[in-house]
Amino acid sequence: QKEVEQNSGPLSVPEGAIASLNCTYSDRGSQSFFWYRQYSGKSPELIMFIYSNGDKEDGRFTAQLNKASQYVSLLIRDSQPSDSATYLCAVRRGGTASKLTFGTGTRLQVTL
Amino acid sequence: GAVVSQHPSWVICKSGTSVKIECRSLDFQATTMFWYRQFPKQSLMLMATSNEGSKATYEQGVEKDKFLINHASLTLSTLTVTSAHPEDSSFYICSARDSAREGEQFFGPGTRLTVL
C-alpha cells in the first residue's frame, strides 16, 4: 500500500465547473496535509495546507480533511484552463522540520 | 517573499563527470533544506534532508557517497552528483523551510540533469 494515494487521472472538467481531487493516506500519525500544483516541467507550488478536520477555504480553493477516514480533498471552484496541471497531495507526520511524503499526483484538465 | 532559487536550471554532462547543483533561499534563512528527485510521470521522491552545519540525513536507498550534500550556510545548500550515469538523469528539486514563517517548505524551480 502506498503511503499517499491519488488517482492519476486525467480528471477532465469543463471551464467554470468544480474540480474535486482526492487523496488517501496510510499513516494515522500524519498531522499536516498539503496540496501542491505542478505545471509540466516546473517545480511544485504550494496551494493550501490544512491541519485540522473540516474545511479550509482560500479563494476558489477548498481543502477538506477527514482524519478518521484518512482522506483529504481539494475542491477547485469555477475551474479555469490555467488550473490545468498536476495536483500533488503531500502529508507530514511530524513538525515543520519533518519530511513531506508525496502522492503521485492527479492530472487535471480544464476544457473550454 | 519565500523565494528559492536553483542553479543551474538545466545541465547536460558526460557519463562519469560530477555535477554540482546549488539551492539558495533568497529572502529568508533556511535551517533545513530538502532535496528531491522526480523522474518523468512520477512523484517527487525525497533524497535527503539537509540541516545547516550538520550532516545530511539520507533516505533509504540513496547513496550518500554518490549524492554529496553540503549545507554550509543558512541560505545555501549544494547537491553534487558524483560520477554521474545516464540513470541519474532526472529533475532535481530543492525546497527550503522558512523557520520564521510557520516553517512551511518552498520549492526551488528545479534542475534538469541529463547525463549522456
Image: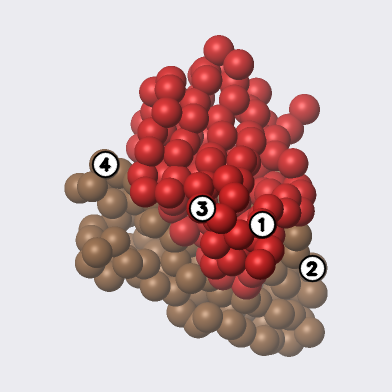
Chain colours: A red, B brown
The CA distance from mark 1 to mark 3 is: 9 Å
From the image, tell me which residue sits under label 1.
Answer: A14
Q: Residues within 10 Å of mark 2 (few under 14, many from 20)?
A: few
In this view, the residue in front, A95 or A87, is A87
Of tags 1 and 2, the one toward the viewer is: 1
Tag 3: Cα neighbours inside 10 Å, few (<14), some, or many (≥20)? some
> Secondary structure beneath disc 2?
helix
Are the two marked residues, 1 and 3, in contact with CB atoms closer than 8 angstroms? no
Q: Could you tell me residue B62's position as x and y percent?
A: 66, 51
Seen at 58% across and 45% down, the residue is A18
Above or below residue B108? Residue B17 is below
Q: Amino acid at mark 4?
A: Glu
Q: Are marks 3 and 4 on the same chain?
A: no
Above or below residue B40? Residue B54 is: above
Q: Residue at x 70, y 39 (%)?
A: A6
Amino acid at the residue labelled 3:
Asp
Foreground disc of the pair 4, 1 = 1
Which of the two residues, A101 or B77, is positioned nearer the viewer here?
A101
Q: Which mark is residue B102?
A: 4
Give the foreground label among 2 and 4.
Answer: 4
On the question of residue B55 being in view, the answer is no
| Residue drawn at the location 43% of the way across and 20% of the way down | A53
Number of the label disc, if any, that sits on residue A40: none
- Tag 4 and tag 1 share a subunit: no
Res. A44 visible in picture: yes
Q: Where, quadrant-wise, is the N terminus of chain B in this rendering?
A: bottom left
Determine the CA span between mark 1 and mark 2: 39 Å
3D distance between C-alphas at marks 3 and 4: 29 Å
Amino acid at the residue labelled 1: Pro
